[in-house]
Structure formats: structure tokens, C-alpha cells
Amino acid sequence: MARVCFRRLGVWVGAAIVAVSTAHGEPQHGIAMYGEPALPPDFVHLPYANPDAPTGGRIVTGEVGGFDSLNPHIRLGSTPWQLRFLAYESLLIRSWDEPFTLYGLLAESVEVDPAGFWVEFTLNPAARFSDNSPVTMEDVIWSYETLGTEGHPRYLNAWQNVETIEALDERRLRITFKEADREMALIMGLRPILKKAQWEGQDFQASGLDVIPIASAPYVVDDFEAGRFVSLRRNPDYWGADLPVRRGTNVIDEIRLEFFADGNAMFEAFKAGIVTTMRETNAANWAENYQFPRVQSGEVILSEVPHQRPSGMNGLVMNTRRAAFSDWRVREAMIQAFNFEYINLTLNGGVEPRITSYFSNSPLGMRDGAATGRVVELLAPFEADLLQGALEGYALPQTDGTEANRAGIRRAMALLEEAGYRVENGVMQTPEGAPFTFDILLSQGSTEMQSIVNIYVEALARLGIVPTVTTVDSAQYRERIDNFDFDMTDITRGLSLSPGNEQRLYWGCDLAETTGSRNLMGACHPAIEAMIDQMLTSASQEDYRAAVHALDRVLMSERYVIPFWYSPISRLAHNAELKFPDYIPIYGDWIGWQPDVWWMEAQ
């Protein structure tokens, strides 16, 4: 088994407000959330890319579920998630070896207002779409306006802070903001650019499988079968192959996305060689199930890839819009009844650490115990609105690891009784006298989630609670999630080393009732709003860090989610001919790493 290493992060993650690198108001090759970009203007390639990687070959990934759309930029439909990143480009591009630094892609340079009121991009004159037509300023402005008004909710929030967008000439674009916000320059730089002419006469919000994307990215959709597979082919005439940010990346000829009904079918396809790379999220499966013949023969390599990114949040989210979970004591009871140690032992062999913070595994996570210093100052104005634990310190329960979890069940029962619930004839009754039940919504094929929920349902039965478990196909699941039509469901929120405006998308008031938003729990709390504002307006790194710690405390103490576990490594099984560089970025196995910097080596 191969374990790869990376350099430790030598600089602290900077505040969103701390000097953007182009604060002198001069066009530059990149911008950073703190200090200067690590790579100079004449850099040759990204440090985690191999500039000598050979082209050719094929990588086949497995996905559970299906799809009914090829447009990843709208709320309707289910789209292969990779299309958003593989089939489209933006003016700027991330470096996954820096916490939030962007370099020029479609834009050859970027310039920002030192006060954060505007950003200017200069379009690369060589930029072309896959049909060899030039990327024009008209395409860029149309893309921003369309995504900002008709696109997925992830685009809408930031667009509300745009005052004007205008072409200064045929290559220069200025976006002016309503309020000073230095992070907005980076957010705007990451908007995908679409070809305007392709959408003339089309209903952008209703597109499905009838519109094949024409974009400027290294890959184009070559073939697909609805719900079965999508094949993306490397464009041999890709305009940006020699750009420093692209050198040594996107060299595999075909990326094929195969879809399966469930995880078991996908794993069997990998064992048979139909799928050529497999990302294993279950530690016990990794230890027990990866000794099949292709591994023993050396045809498949097992790689463990470390990372330094925050754990984010993965668990069961409770919809506070529903009466069942409007009381925090009920939510805490649900957390107490969740026997983490037993479930972790059963499913992972007990090796995975628990998520104890939205920013676990990083310096951004809240500190143990009572809040101190600047964190107390930031939270003090909201003390009356804070739940128990926000200031005093909040910690998840630890069980004895036995199946019964008697202590946790006792604590859960006491909390429910305090909230007015009672057990009659073995059935938990609400304060109104009705049987207390709720529905857990799952997507078809989520095998591990089903296993977790099965154990959890058995534990809840000890409280006299018998929830229903509803499993639907991926399209129905997406529709119900978009409409907040659930009591409890699974949630995964990946968080970066530079959290900022996107936090409003996850738990901001403005999107709590917006159909299709990512605020699944229905969070709307004045302290959350204030801490996000503070993150975006802090005058020092210390203030920024304190604001993130404070935000973390409020989110955890509100008990929105029953957290699972995270892994400080990624476990990748892959065909031996699929290679990646020895140098691993601080984000590790993340979007933009596989398949972007991988290559295929002839055996």
C-alpha cells in the first residue's frame, strides 16, 4: 500500500479582508486572500503538476445514481457533478497548494481596487471555445448576468452585491460592487464562462440532455447515454494547453463517468476492471475488501493521500423548519442517541476520528472549553440568542462503545422529557399527545448511509421513537432536497481553508427559505450572520480567525447536524498505469487533482 506525503502548510490561512495581492491597483498574474501569490509571474507550472506527463489513455470513474441533464449551472435536473469542473472554465483558476490563491486562466491578468469596490479582468486574446470560436467579452458578460439571474442559487447570492458589469474595451471587463468586499474579486473570477450563441432561443433554466456544452475547457462531452455514462474527450486543439496553470494537467485522453444503481454494483465493476479508479470512504472496507485478485497481482495500486483541509460537515441534518426539530433539546436528544463509537467500530473498525467541529483537522476549528478573548467579544452581543454551549464550550457525547449506549439513551430521554415529551405504552408522545415520529430521507444506492441509519433507527427504538426511512432515486431525492421536503437526511459540506461568502449559501438567513439553496437545516441566526460579516470585514488575521472560531461555536451549539467522521487521508485504489506526482498539494485529493494532474503510463 502506497502512502504519499506532502509538505506541511508553512503559512497561516489569511483573512478574507487581509490585503489582496493586487492591492496596488496594478494588473497581475494572480490574486491571493493574503499576502502575495506563492508563484511568481513567470512560473512554469503548478507545483503539484508534472509538466512532462505523457498524453493519452483513459480513466473510468464510478458514480452511484443517474443523471437527466448536462447543464450543471441550474437548479433543475440531476447533472454529473464533474461537468461543472471538467467541461467549463473561468477567468481565474485555483491553486490547490495555496489556501485561496487564484491565477489567470481565461483572463491573462487581474486588477483590484484596494478598497474592494471593483475588480478588472483582461481577457486572454487566445481564449477559444471547443468549436474554435473566440471567447468574447459578450460571452463573458452574458455568462455573468445569466448565471446571476437564472442560474443555480450558488450564483445568486454574490450577484446581489454586483452594482455594474461593463466592458471597458474588447478585452477588459470591470465589475463594480455595491459594498466593499475583497473576496468578491475572487468569487467573480471563478464564474464559469458559457458560449452565448449556443443558448440563443433556448430556455436556460429548462435545459436537459438536448444541449451538449460548448465551452473553452480541455474536455468536451463526446458521448453519453442518459443515466448510464458520460464520456469526455480531451480536445487536441485546446487553446490553453501551454498556459502555466495547465502545463502537465488534463493529459488523459478520455474521462468516462459510469453510473451504477448502488455502491455494491460499482465496487464489483471496479474489481472486474470496468472502473479504473475507486475512492473508498470506508476504512473497514479499505482494510478488508481490497485484497481481490487485481490488487494481489499488482494490476491495482492502493494509495493513501493525506490532506490538511477542514473536515467540513458530514452527518444527518435535522430540518428546523419542521416542528419535530424546532426545539434544540430534541436535536440534542437525537445527537445523544446516536452511538458514534459503536457505529464507527462497526463500519470503520473504529479508526476514523469524529467530526467535532465544522473545521476539524485545521487551525480554523473552535478551541475546546469556554470561549476566550476576541471570540467572547464577538459573541457577547448575541449572548441572549446563543444556545447552551456556545460560550461555555460544546462537546459531542462519547459513549462506552457498547450497542446499548445506556448513558446516552438516559440523557436523550431526560432532554425529551424536559421538552414536554413522554412515553406511553412504549411510544414516545409529543407535547401535543401524538406519537413522535419523523422521516429519514435517503438517496437510492447510498449503501453506507443506509447501514448507519439502520443502526441509528434501532437505537431510537429504545426511546420509543420509530422513524420511517424513505429511499428514493437520485432525481426524486434532488427534488425533495431542493424543496426542503424532508425531516432528516444526510448532509455533506466541504469547507475550505479560506471560508468566506460561501458560508451564506450554507447557513445564511437569506437562503433559509430559498428553494434549491444549500441551507438544508434552515439556519437563520443573528450571530451566524454577524460572524460571516466579521470574517469578510476583519482588519487582521487574528480577527478573522476569531470570527471563524465563533461561527463554528454557534453552528455546533445549535445542534443542526449529527456529525459522523472524517478521514485525514483519502484512500484511492486505481489501476497501476494511472499515475500522479509525488508532490501532494495541501488540499490533497480534492477537486482539480484527480484526474486533472494524473496521467496514464504504458505498462
Image (tube, rainbow, N blue to C red):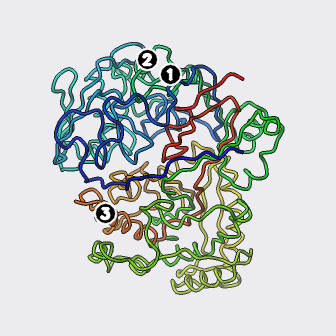
Q: Can residue 581 be seen in this view?
A: yes
Residue 472, how many percent across, how many down? 63, 49
**Residue position for label 3:** 529
Mark sitting on residue 220: 1
Q: Residues within 10 Å of mark 2 (few under 14, many from 20)?
A: many
Please identify the quarter of the rendering in which residue 456 is found.
bottom right
Q: Residues within 10 Å of mark 1 (few under 14, many from 20)?
A: many
At label 2, the amino acid type is Ser
At label 1, the amino acid type is Val
Precedes in sequence: disc 1 or disc 2: 2
Mark sitting on residue 130: 2
Above-or-below relation of 358 to 57? below
Residue 323, how many percent across, how many down? 48, 70
Quarter holding the N terminus? top right
Q: Is residue 228 visible?
A: no
Q: What element carries label 3?
A: helix
Q: Are marks 1 and 2 in contact (CB under 8 Å)?
A: yes
Q: Do the residues labelled 3 and 2 touch (CB within 8 Å)?
A: no
State left or right for residue 61 relative to residue 559: right
At label 3, the amino acid type is Glu
Q: How far apart are marks 3 and 2 (CA)?
A: 42 Å
Quarter holding the C terminus? top right
**Numbered circles on residues, count:** 3
